Image (cartoon, rainbow, N blue to C red):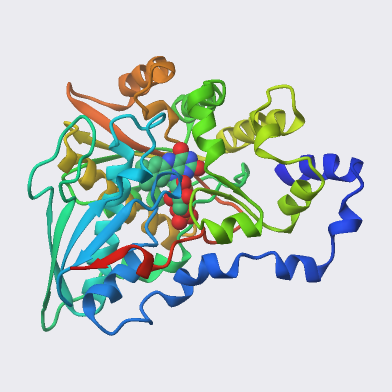
């Protein structure tokens, strides 16, 4: 639907022929911004940077890539958060940022094991505040060579895992066996729940749609996303993070003046309306949901939720399932309060339990990788 609708407006603007053609498509791919996906595991011979070159491919909110690593040696490092890469409007307590760093740590450990190293990860070694993140380290990392260490089979799917925001196929149900494997993929310090039919599926579709619509209507929250949009190849290459609106098609709309940060923010524009329709399409074609809960919500619990999400996402990839987090209802700003309450009512079973991640599932057309900053821009030698 997304493509069809955009085609309608692009067609009426008469820009398809002007901007179309295979050559255009081939030259609009942000090749530099995708290099980290090609280089993972191959640029560095030392075990620390080799493992980190995979860790930077972890999912993370709004693709902010908030990781900064101080290299102490070939086997020791300290992970910190770049406090300039937070999401104050939609993630006021930096909970989601920490979950993304948890994803990073899980991928780091898997990549190290794949290379024969056991990763010792000590999260928040100097403690952490529940309010806002500060300069204290997120984790101390140490690698130790271990003979006979068996890698994790999930790691093989790292380069194929991508957040998939396409429409999902409503003719293809998700088998209970697959949901069972997703629930089994995470460590047992979190609770993973799933749904694939009945009232629960339809409730979650509606709830995630309504929460996302509410976010778009909350100026400060929506504006935070708009400012992180990279529209077209030049913007993506210059800042390979945030929300990449790339590809020949969207670039064409940008050139035609149809797609811009201003039009996306303007509730009377067609881009804005199409955005709302795309949200509905995504949510309502969900064929299943998976959620990750922790008991309590301290920093370590958030790290564990991220580690679990990483594993669940790789298991989904292994099983050919598309997946997209739908985080709005879990967020802690005022406009989300009613959705937050409903989701916790429905998906938790004891006081103090917190839903940390909620993602839609289904079968869909494949989607490509999201940009990444190269590893060398995220490490410091001390
Ligand atoms: C804590 C967290 C929350 C996220 N929330 C959303 C979300 O609400 N909607 C969405 O489309 N993607 C969400 N994502 C996915 C990120 O946008 C995605 O990981 C990032 O853009 C990088 O893309 P990739 O996963 O394809 O590598 C979330 C990821 C994390 C770790």
Name the residue rendered at 16%, 51% in the picture: 137
Number of on-image labels? 0
Quarter of the image where one finds residue 310: bottom left
Whether residue 325 appears in this view of the structure is no
Where does residue 21 sit, x and y in percent of width and height? 84, 66
Q: Farthest residue to the front: give it.
A: 382
> At x 60% / y 33%, what residue is drawn?
279
Position of the N terminus, as image quadrant, is top right
Work out which quarter of the rendered image holds the C terminus and state it: bottom left
Residue 29, compared with residue 194, is above or below; it is below
Q: Is residue 322 above or below residue 111?
A: above
Residue 38 drawn at (x, y percent): 48, 75
Point 15% across, 77% down: residue: 149
Image position, residue 29 (x, y; %): 65, 65
Q: Nearer the viewer, residue 296 or 135?
A: 135
- Looking at the image, residue 115 lies above or below residue 36: below
Q: Judge from the rendering whether residue 215 lies leftward or rightward of residue 70; answer left or right.
A: right
Q: Which of 331 and 314 lies nearest the eye of the viewer?
A: 331
Q: Is residue 352 left or right of residue 152?
A: left
Instruction: Point out residue 43 in the picture as x, y percentages from the top left corner.
Output: 37, 81
User: Residue 200's image quarter?
Assistant: top left
Q: Nearer the viewer, residue 330 or 361?
A: 330
The answer to whether any part of residue 23 appears in the image is yes
Q: Is residue 225 left or right of residue 121?
A: right
Foreground of the two, 152 or 319: 152
The structure residue drawn at horizontal position 70% and vertical position 64%, both measured from the top left corner, is 28
């Amino acid at each position: 639907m997304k493509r069809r609708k955009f085609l309608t407006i692009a067609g009426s603007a008469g820009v398809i022929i002007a901007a179309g053609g295979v050559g255009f498509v081939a030259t609009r791919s942000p090749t530099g911004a995708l290099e980290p996906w090609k280089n993972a595991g191959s640029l560095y011979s030392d075990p620390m940077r080799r493992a980190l070159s995979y860790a930077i491919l972890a999912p993370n909110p709004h693709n902010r890539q908030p990781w900064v690593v101080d290299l102490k040696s070939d086997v020791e490092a300290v992970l910190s958060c770049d406090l300039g890469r937070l999401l104050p409007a939609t993630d006021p307590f930096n909970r989601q940022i920490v979950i993304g760093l948890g994803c990073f740590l899980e991928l780091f450990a898997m990549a190290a094991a794949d290379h024969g190293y056991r990763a010792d990860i000590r999260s928040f070694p100097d403690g952490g505040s529940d309010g806002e993140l500060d300069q204290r380290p997120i984790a101390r990392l140490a690698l130790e060579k271990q003979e006979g260490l068996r890698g994790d089979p999930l790691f093989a799917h790292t380069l194929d895992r991508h957040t998939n925001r396409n429409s999902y196929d409503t003719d293809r149900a998700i088998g209970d066996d697959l949901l069972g494997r997703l629930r089994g993929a995470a460590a047992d310090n979190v609770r993973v729940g799933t749904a694939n039919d009945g009232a629960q599926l339809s409730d979650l579709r509606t709830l995630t749609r309504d929460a996302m619509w509410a976010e778009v209507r909350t100026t400060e929250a929506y504006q935070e996303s708009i400012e992180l949009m990279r529209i077209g190849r030049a913007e993506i290459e210059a800042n390979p993070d945030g929300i990449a609106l790339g590809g020949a098609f969207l670039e064409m709309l940008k050139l035609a003046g149809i797609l811009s940060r201003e039009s996306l923010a303007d509730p009377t524009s067609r881009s804005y309306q199409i955005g709302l329709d795309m949200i509905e399409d995504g949510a309502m074609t969900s064929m299943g949901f998976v959620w990750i809960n922790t008991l309590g919500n301290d920093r370590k619990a958030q790290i564990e939720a991220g580690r679990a999400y990483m594993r669940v996402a790789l298991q989904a990839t292994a099983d050919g399932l598309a997946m997209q987090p739908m985080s709005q209802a879990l967020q802690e700003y005022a406009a989300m309060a009613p959705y937050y309450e409903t989701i916790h009512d429905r998906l938790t079973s004891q006081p103090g339990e917190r839903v940390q991640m909620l993602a839609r599932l289904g079968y869909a057309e494949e989607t490509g990788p999201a940009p990444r900053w190269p590893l060398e821009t995220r490490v410091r030698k001390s």
